[in-house]
Image: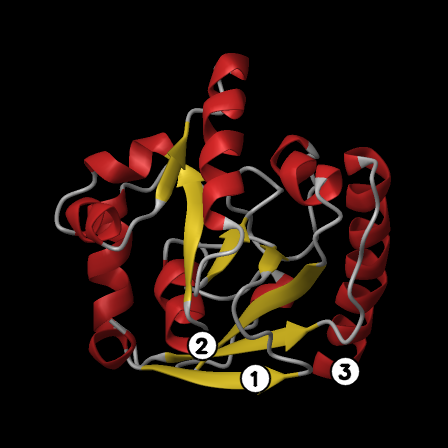
Amino acid sequence: MMVLTGGKLDLQGSVPKPSFYLVSNHLSYADIWVLLASLRATFVAKHDLKSWPIMGQAMKLIGIIFVNRTKKMDISRVNKLISRELHSPRGLIVFPEGTTTLGDELKPYHSPLLEIPASQQFPVHSVLLHYEDKMGGGKSLFGSSYVPWWDDTSFVAHFISLLTKKGYIARLSFSDQIWKDESRKKLTESIYEWSEIEYENLKKHAQ
């Protein structure tokens, strides 16, 4: 998918090795193949992705854990799966914003999916992902990239549009810091605080 869409990787910071628990901001379905190209990992992703043509089946085959965020009871089921996956020979990636965004700011991080690493005192890493377009030089940090998929545009229409562009650079900034806390809310707050500061720094350097 990186080759098909003309994507290139730019990795900064301490890239974690399995097993790991990683939280990431979320801009597009492209985040999934970008992160898979960078790490040996699987994901916790929203349940409607599995119904997507082709990509949905591919995500099932690589063992993505699907969660229905509209049903609170589903978090319990997913946390059991996370607990099993936590010490596997691959990492686990979650998107605590719960949805994709335009990229010009971070949405608040939700804490339920950090319940298991908090309860087991398992170290948590963080990464901030942003895109720079090869055609036109748009940057997701300023809401001007064509890679994020956040509005009512259909997946098929957005994907076809992405294929017609000249490609993009996916920039991943991994945290050197690792977090542990027995409280999932404090853990989430600490990671989000770092993420907000780092995101603003990335925007300053991108100007």
In this rendering, position of residue 169 left or right of residue 152: right
Q: Earlier in the sequence, mark 2 or mark 1?
A: 1
The quarter of the displayed image where residue 188 is located? top right
* SS label for mark 3: helix
Label placed on residue 205: 3
The correct choice, above or below, for 180 with respect to 146 in the image is above
In this rendering, position of residue 118 left or right of residue 145: right
Q: Label 2 is placed on what type of residue?
A: Ser
In the rendered image, which residue does mark 1 sit on? 11
Distance between the alpha carbons at the discs numbered 1 and 3 = 15 Å
* SS label for mark 2: helix
Q: Label 3 is placed on what type of residue?
A: His
Q: Label 1 is placed on what type of residue?
A: Leu
Q: Residue at x 14, y 44 (%)?
A: 53
In this rendering, position of residue 80 left or right of residue 187: left
* SS label for mark 1: strand
Distance between the alpha carbons at the discs numbered 2 and 1 = 8 Å
The quarter of the displayed image where residue 172 is located? bottom right
Q: Quadrant of the C terminus?
A: bottom right
Distance between the alpha carbons at the discs numbered 3 and 2 = 23 Å
Label placed on residue 38: 2
Q: What percent of the width, then of the height, locates residue 49?
A: 30, 39
Whether pointer 2 and pointer 1 mark residues with C-beta atoms closer than 8 Å, the reply is yes
Q: Nearer the viewer, residue 194 or 39?
A: 39
